[in-house]
Image (cartoon, rainbow, N blue to C red):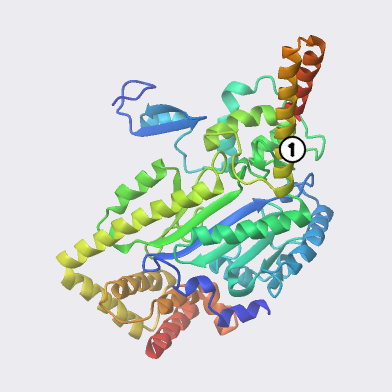
């Protein structure tokens, strides 16, 4: 099989990405795999690697001095170290992190353990939403459209929290 | 108990009592956890680190699994003691010997927690043989108890929030240490390792990131931490390791049936050198001990496996020096190591 990037060399690097159940494959020669940052040079550092994953597509709109309001960590600090500054950094740098996580983990959604309190909160929220949805159905059936609109907005709001 | 008491004790994971202990030395799980809103250790100021450490300390000391444990202040630790704890797999080589950082070790060295390493908490469970499922039951319970008391940083979409995004989600790393001498000898390992990598498994040396593979001992761990359930990762790892064991066993059988004489020769020679040498480098001893371990598993030589496990650790540089009670030059270490091995072999 020839490299999908240059089409000249034999592909020796095979990469499979599964994002939300959709599988995509990539077959590259060593040279092109290196260029794309898949193969590490000997001066490898985590920050370089993460930075490389961040760099090209997503970030023209993001200022390097974008700062976490909780701890003061900047976006360029992240690119230098590969680390975040505190748990709230994840909200401040949400936008560039989302695609990065997909690249690192093949997913950007946690489906593992929830701390007990959060698990209970989530259950409550889900049952709240279910209740609201039922009410919405009833309101539509009764043609109470003003109430239906109010319920629709409330569902949206609860889902966002 | 104090740190120096550890030298005379055998960690539980070295006792070769776990399942599949003919190939699997140990199973380890660690969870990365952080407190909400407080700066992560690399970004925290001294007073933040001290505050975090003060908040966590009484909670850890009260916990059932750590109650009678050993608490080690990193700032008070000598570099020899640091190396000693690294060799025992209780801390990472990167753990700084500075204020606001401490390690707590539970009985038998099964449970341990590093405070203010890369994350605020690094919780570890280490057991003998292939027991990732057991490790998970234990660490899950411990994590739940600590979370009740502290409240860890967590996001519904992204899971447990960690210093490095590569640990985000479950914050869990599962590692198994496997002894694969036959796959190495037959060079089949070069086919096996790339296959594992394709399945999202990371293979490294005995001491984690960047360490070389010694004594045919490989550390196999999971890669991704986001988008998979912990139980799923544990099951996946266990079944992969079982397959790996299967390959190793087949390679051993083939090797033994085709090259019985030369394998027996290697094992007895290794025994002879270990019994008689006057200078022994750590590299040489770990590789001879690997041969001896294979000899025990193949029934060529009758020694206790626990004895090899113990020597694997005791012959490491920091352990030798702790046993001698002083720092030694490399040559003094080689002499002390040779004597230790000779004495132990006489006893066994």
**The N terminus of chain B lies in which quarter of the figure?**
bottom right
Q: On screen, A93 above or below B93?
A: above
Q: Which of A60 and A159 is in front in this view?
A: A159
Q: On screen, A20 above or below B323?
A: above
Find residue A110 and report its horizontal and vertical position in percent. 61, 39
Which residue lies under the disc numbered 1?
A: A124
Q: Of helix, strand and loop, which one carries label 1?
A: helix
User: Could you tell whether B282 is left or right of B12 in the image?
Assistant: left
Find residue B10 and report its horizontal and vertical position in percent. 53, 78
Residue A139 picture quarter = top right
Q: Identify the chain of the residue marked 1, using the numbered disc in the image.
A: A
Residue B23 picture quarter = bottom left
Is residue B203 visible from the viewing direction of this image?
no
Residue found 37% across the figure and 28% down from its top: A27
Find residue B284 and report its horizontal and vertical position in percent. 38, 71
Categorize mark 1 by other alpha carbons within 10 Å: few (<14), some (14-19), many (20+): few
Residue found 39% across the figure and 73% down from its top: B285
Is residue A63 visible from the viewing direction of this image?
yes
Residue found 59% across the figure and 71% down from its top: B109
**The C terminus of chain B lies in which quarter of the figure?**
bottom left
Total count of labels? 1
Find residue B66 and report its horizontal and vertical position in percent. 68, 69
Residue found 61% across the figure and 63% down from its top: B91
User: Could you tell whether B65 is left or right of A48 in the image?
Assistant: right
Q: Nearer the viewer, residue A43 or B130?
A: B130
């Amino acid at each position: 099989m020839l490299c999908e990037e240059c089409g000249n060399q034999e592909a020796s690097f095979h990469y499979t990405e599964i994002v939300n159940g959709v599988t995509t494959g990539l077959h590259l020669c060593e040279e092109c795999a290196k260029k794309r940052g898949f193969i590490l040079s000997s001066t490898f550092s985590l920050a370089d690697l993460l930075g490389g994953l961040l760099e090209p597509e997503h970030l023209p709109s993001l200022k390097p001095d974008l700062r976490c309001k909780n701890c003061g960590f900047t976006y360029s600090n992240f690119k230098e170290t590969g680390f975040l500054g505190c748990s709230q950094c994840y909200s401040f740098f949400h936008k560039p992190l989302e695609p990065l996580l997909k690249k690192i983990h093949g997913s950007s959604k946690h489906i593992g353990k929830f701390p007990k309190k959060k698990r209970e909160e989530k259950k409550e929220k889900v049952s709240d939403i279910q209740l609201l949805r039922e009410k919405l159905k009833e309101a539509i059936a009764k043609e109470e459209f003003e109430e239906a609109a109010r319920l629709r907005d409330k569902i949206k709001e609860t889902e966002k929290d | 108990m104090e740190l120096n008491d550890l030298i005379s004790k055998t960690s539980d994971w070295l006792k070769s009592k776990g399942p599949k202990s003919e190939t699997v030395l140990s199973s380890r799980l660690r969870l990365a956890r952080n407190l909400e809103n407080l700066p992560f250790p690399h970004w925290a100021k001294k007073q933040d680190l001290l505050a975090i450490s003060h908040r966590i300390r009484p909670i850890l000391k009260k916990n059932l699994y750590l109650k009678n444990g050993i608490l080690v202040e990193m700032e008070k630790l000598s570099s020899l003691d640091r190396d000693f704890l690294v060799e025992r797999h209780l801390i990472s080589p990167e753990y700084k010997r500075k204020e606001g950082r401490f390690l707590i070790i539970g009985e038998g060295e099964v449970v341990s927690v590093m405070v203010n390493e890369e994350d605020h908490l690094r919780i570890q469970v280490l057991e003998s043989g292939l027991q990732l499922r057991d490790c998970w039951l234990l660490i899950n319970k411990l994590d739940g108890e600590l979370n009740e008391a502290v409240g860890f940083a967590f996001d519904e979409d992204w899971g447990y929030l960690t210093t490095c995004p590569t640990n985000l989600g479950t914050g869990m790393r599962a590692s198994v240490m496997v002894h694969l001498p036959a796959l190495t000898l037959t060079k089949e390992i070069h086919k096996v390792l790339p296959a594992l990598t394709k399945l999202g498994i990371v293979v490294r040396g005995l001491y984690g990131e960047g360490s070389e593979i010694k004594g045919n001992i490989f550390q196999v761990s999971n890669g991704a931490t986001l988008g998979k359930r912990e139980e799923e990762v544990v099951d996946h790892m266990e079944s992969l390791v079982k397959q790996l064991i299967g390959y190793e066993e087949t390679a051993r059988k083939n090797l033994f049936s085709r090259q019985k004489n030369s394998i027996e020769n290697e094992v007895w020679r290794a025994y002879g050198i270990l019994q008689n040498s006057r200078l022994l480098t750590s590299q040489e001893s770990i590789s001879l001990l690997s041969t001896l371990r294979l000899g025990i598993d193949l029934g060529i030589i009758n020694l206790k496996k626990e004895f090899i496990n113990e020597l694997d650790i005791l012959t490491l540089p920091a352990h030798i020096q702790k046993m001698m009670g002083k720092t030694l030059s490399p040559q003094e270490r080689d002499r002390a190591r040779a004597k230790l091995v000779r004495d132990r072999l006489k006893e066994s």
